[in-house]
Amino acid sequence: MVNARLTLAQTTLSKKLGISRQWVGELVSRLERAGWLEHSSPKLPDGTNGSSVWRVGRMLKRLLVMLGKSRRGEKLRNTPAKSTWHFSPPKREKEILSFLNNEQELPSLHLLEKIPLLGQWLTRGKKQAEG
């Protein structure tokens, strides 16, 4: 990537970014002054500028080299076959899940004996769902 080159017109770049061509020119000159990128635009036979040729600047090269060197010192660690991380849901989430599970269960027979109307209502709902 250090020696990479890209040919792209500033107009095309401005359309892709959704900003004006003048603003692209301003940003490019700022990045070039800071050393992050380099660009040149060859003159065409009719006197206009051709598509810009973009290259990595000296600051970006330094950053890439530093990042590359920082990885060399690290030793690759073997990851365990089975992850030791166990995430459990927070207390409130457990309560909500428990409530939703309890909502799906039918009431106990003991409760249905105490509230016969509830038993009738539940059986009526089953009959309507089947029929």
Image (tube, helix red, strand yellow):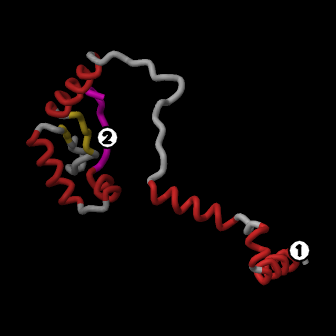
Residue extending farthest bottom: 117
Residue extending farthest right: 131
State whether residue 64 is above or below residue 89: above
**Residue situated in front as seen by the camera: 105 or 39:** 105
Percent x, y for residue 114?
75, 77
- Which segment did they paint magenta? 1-9
State the residue at coordinates (46%, 60%): 92
State the residue at coordinates (48%, 46%): 88
**Residue situated in front as seen by the camera: 100 or 47:** 100
**Side of 101 relative to 73 (left or right):** right
**Side of 12 relative to 102 (left or right):** left
Crowding at label 1, few (<14), some or many (≥20) Cα neighbours within 10 Å?
few
State whether residue 104 is above or below residue 43: below
Crowding at label 2, few (<14), some or many (≥20) Cα neighbours within 10 Å?
some
**Side of 14 relative to 80 (left or right):** left
Amino acid type for the residue under numbered disc 1: Glu
State whether residue 105 is above or below residue 123: above
Query: Which residue is label 1 attached to?
Result: 130
State the residue at coordinates (18%, 60%): 22
Amino acid type for the residue under numbered disc 2: Thr
Percent x, y for residue 129?
84, 75
Percent x, y for residue 115?
75, 79
* 4 in magenta: yes
Percent x, y for residue 96?
53, 62
Q: Quadrant of residue 7?
A: top left
- Helix or strand or loop: what does disc 2 sit on? strand
State the residue at coordinates (20%, 40%): 39
* Quadrant (top left, top right, bottom left, bottom right) of the C terminus: bottom right
Query: Which residue is label 2 attached to?
Result: 7
- Helix or strand or loop: what does disc 1 sit on? helix
State whether residue 124 is above or below residue 41: below
